[in-house]
Image (spheres, grey):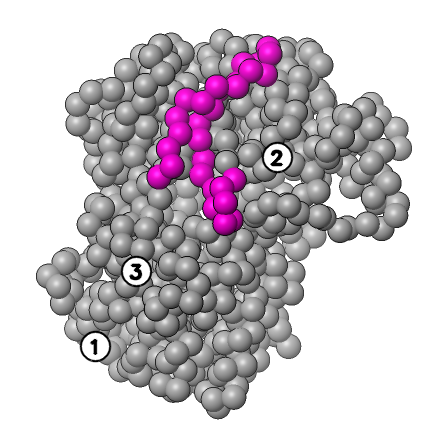
Amino acid sequence: MPRLLSLRLSPDGSRLVSVVQSLNPDGKSYGTSIWDVPIEPGGEPHRLTRSAKGESGVEFAPNGDLLFVSQRPDPAVKDQPEDEMPGLWTLPARGGEAYRLVDRPGGIGGLQVGGDTVVFHADVLDGEAATEADRRKSRKDAGISAILHEGYPIRFWDRDLGPGRPRLFAAGLPGLTEPRDLTPDPGGALVEASFGVSPDGSSVASMWVMELPAGGSRSELVEIDTATGERRVLAASDEHDFSGPVSYSPDGRHIACWRERHATEDRAVEFALWIVDLATGEGAPRTTDLAPSATVWAADSQSLYVAADDHGRRPIFRVGLTGDPERLTPDDAAYLEPCPSPDGRYLYALRSSVAGPATPVRITLDGGEVTELPSPAPAVGIPGTLTEVTAVADDGVEIRGWLALPPGASADNPVPLLLWIHGGPLASWTDWSWRWNPWIMAEHGYAVLMPDPCLSTGYGQDMIQRGWGVWGPRTHADLMAITDAAVARPDVDAERTAVMGGSFGGYMANWMAGHTDRFRAIVTHASLWSLEQFAGTTDSAHYWQREFGPQGSDRYRVLSPHHWLEDISTPMLVIHGDKDYRVPIGEALRLWWDLRRSSVESKFLYFPDENHWILKPGNVVAWYETVLAFLGQHVLGEEWKRPESVA
């Protein structure tokens, strides 16, 4: 089904556009396109772009033209290579065909606009820019894929870093002057860096990663002059990272970003909305009790709209330069992509929930009325009902979660329970997921429990701190408490239960396998099995070692699930993608070998071409079919039948 990925409002407030993802004609991949979304109810969305390569990174220019990134071929250029790199394109507001503004040998990444200036990321090989295309061609022609690293990291999520490094370029609009290299020697400072452009286009504020001894790093906030490339530090701390989204206030007087306090073995990370006064250069936190997902300045520059997790929802808060945050949306929804109108009357956003995918809405800022707008994607009906479950853990803390119930669940027809543990661990069950979707399980007759145990966001700093450094034991107790509450319901069958999770949820599935036999089946996806092995092979080892301590310390022994292998008796389905760099495939390979040598009934669903998530349509089908067959065998007592998708 089509999915809305983003939302952007034109500078004059007259147009909304969204990038929409949908299945390609071959049925084997997804493509993207740009759609116009009506700003009033009753209109009709219409598609603006069509290309086999798709479009992303959409932003408005001041004159209303659309800027976007695409690998589509340029009809004005003959004999283009099949592996054309992403270029910067524009679609004129007054009509006409899209055309390419600029390209780079290493492609173009994210972009931002301020005034008549566009700033974009581009991957660049070291050396003279004029010969970069030749250097890339020489590597390709010689069959060289080797990358020599002298720093860390070398991988990120599902992709290798290098041999090029991202730089920032600035160019003038509307015709696009020759782009200027603002960061000619950044090293790895701009890898995955968020940035924003000032309203007049004279400067860009960006994250700037500083490499530290012993494999560590910290992220500063810097400001770069778009005319000269001169760089100054706006925020830096030995104990904090400053990260995106980074944005200037409309009056150009302040910059907002997020500050994350570095963790220690005893102290959890902590987030704060950080505001820098550009006149004085001073910065200060505005709030430390919101778990951020999106921020945007109000039109009057006196406040920001912040989408933040809150007890299984993600409302929008108004956070002023002074005073307490004010919640604007009272419903159970999760909001993203907030877009304030220039007249200060409305806030446009994408709204979803565990019970429904993202759809565009308009929020009246005076009163909070939420109006649904026509969407490029059809509405989705869910096969069941969503309710809330709470329980009190052994230490007196309330644990809450969502329970998806299939049709027909009742005291006369109690249904099996599937405990689904979220990843993160700093995360929450707040909104719709196309990959981790409980309603497919509900459609097959399962009640799906989605709890927020310790370390979940949206419950204050204490909820994170109580699970810090005690992942397995504390989270296990929380999960058992809310599972007990769920199976006490008359419409849930306490004897037919299973547990599954991915990433941190997979870690917990492995932990629970060695600490309880109450479940009939366990599904563990992209999971951590040997913590010391994981902490040295993941793409961001320095981050996790702040909590676990140096390798070899006692915490690895206390918290690593593999030490309880001999206590596992529950059948397990292990799932992993070979291109997973966050939780490397070695975790699954070792888990699989350990289960086999211990004679635990188990199966291994292996994806050679997938990463931390399983994204290709055919593989997603194989994932769900195999999980359902495995659960059916062990929870429902059905005969095991190998799914056609993996036969």
How many C-alpha atoms fall within 10 Å of the one at disc 1: few (<14), some, or many (≥20)?
A: few
**Which residue corresponds to mark 2?**
187
The disc labelled 1 sits on which kind of residue? Asp
231 is within the stretch colored magenta: yes
Disc 1 element = loop
| Picture quadrant of residue 182 | top right
Q: Is residue 368 left or right of residue 509?
A: left
Which residue is at a point 32% across and 22% down the rendered structure image? 283
Q: Is residue 315 visible?
A: no
Q: Earlier in the sequence, mark 1 or mark 3?
A: 1
C-alpha separation, residue under disc 1 versus residue under disc 3: 43 Å
Estimate the x, y position of residue 429 in percent, counting from the top left. 32, 53
Q: Residue at x 78, y 41 (%)?
A: 83
Mark 2 or 3 closer to N-term? 2
Q: Percent position (x, y) of residue 338?
A: 38, 29
Residue at 37% of width from left, 33% of height from top? 237
Q: Position of residue 88 (x, y in %)?
A: 67, 25
Q: Is residue 395 visible?
A: yes
Name the mark on residue 232.
Answer: none
Q: Quadrant of the C terminus?
A: bottom right
* Residue 261 to residue 92: above or below: below
Q: Is residue 531 magenta?
A: no
In space, the residues marked 1 and 2 are separated at their CA atoms by: 65 Å
Please name the amino acid that badge 3 sits on.
Answer: Gly
Closer-to-camera residue (27/505): 505
Residue closer to the observer: 71 or 378: 71
